[in-house]
Amino acid sequence: MVERSELQKMARTIDAHRKQLDTLHARVEQVSAILEEHDITSSILDELIHSMSTGRASAQLSIGSGVSLNYVHEGDKEGTAMVDIGSGIFGQKSWSDAHKMTIERKQGILLLHQELSEQSTQLEEKITTLAQEFNTAAEQLQPKSSSQISEKTSDEAKSSEPSAEKQTRRQPRRGSRFGNELTLDD
C-alpha cells in the first residue's frame, strides 16, 4: 500500500516533468522559427545566384518597421553578402558561399530540432507512465467502498459486546475539504 507522502512525491515529480516538457516545447518552437528563417534566406540567396545569368539581380530588403529597400545588382559578377561568422563578427561572402553556409547551419539546426523532438516524445511517455502509476497508487489509498463499510457496521452491530479497543481507535479524517479523492495537487 502506498502512503500519502509517496503520492505527493509522485505528484511533484510529474509536475516537474510537465514544466520541463513545456520548456522543451518552447525550445522546439524557437528552433522551428530559426529553421523557417534559414529556409527564407536560402531561397533568396538561391534566387539571387540564379538571376545572375540575366545580368541583373534584384530583391527587396526589409530594414524593419515595415520599410523595405530595393536592391539591384547589375553585371554578370556574383554579388556579396555580409554573413555572421560567429561571436557577432560579420564577413563579406559571395552569394554562393553565403548560401552554402546557410544550408550547413540549417542542417545543424535540423539535428537539434530532431533531438529536442525526441526528448519531448520520451518525456511525454514518461509523464504518461508516471501519471498512470500515480492513479493506481491513489486508488489503493482511497477509503473502502461504502458497501464494505456498511457490511462491517452490520457485523459489529450483531456482536453482543463491541470491544473497548475498537471504540477508542478512531482514524483521523483524511482528505481535502472537497472530498476524499486525491488529485495531483494533494
Image (cartoon, grey):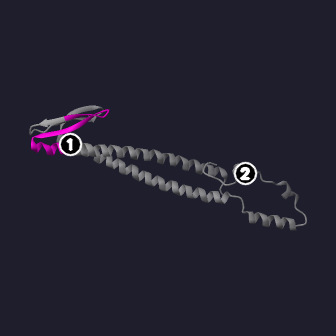
Q: Is residue 95 left or right of residue 141?
A: left
Q: Is residue 11 left or right of residue 20?
A: right
In the rendered image, residue 62 lying in the magenta stretch gets the answer yes
Of badges 2 and 1, the one in the foreground is 1
Q: Is residue 120 left or right of residue 74?
A: right
Going 32% across and 32% down the picture, which residue do you hit?
A: 65
User: Could you classify mark 1 by the number of other residues whose Cα lies within 10 Å: few (under 14), some (14-19), or many (20 or more)?
Assistant: many
In the rendered image, residue 91 lying in the magenta stretch gets the answer no
Q: Relative to the observer, which residue lies in front, 31 or 51? A: 51
Going 84% across and 65% down the picture, which residue do you hit?
A: 156
Which element carries disc 1, helix, strand or loop?
Answer: helix
Q: Amino acid at mark 2?
A: Arg
Q: Badge 1 is on which residue?
A: 45
- Per the rendered image, the range of residues in magenta is 44-70
Q: Relative to the observer, which residue lies in front, 183 or 72? A: 72
**N-term mark: 2 or 1:** 1
In the rendered image, which quarter contains the N terminus?
bottom right
Which element carries disc 2, helix, strand or loop?
Answer: loop
**Mark 2 and mark 1: span between their CA atoms?**
68 Å
* Residue 174: image tag: 2
Residue 142's quadrant in the figure? bottom right
Give the x, y percent position of residue 33: 35, 44
User: Could you classify mark 2 by the number of other residues whose Cα lies within 10 Å: few (under 14), some (14-19), or many (20 or more)?
Assistant: few
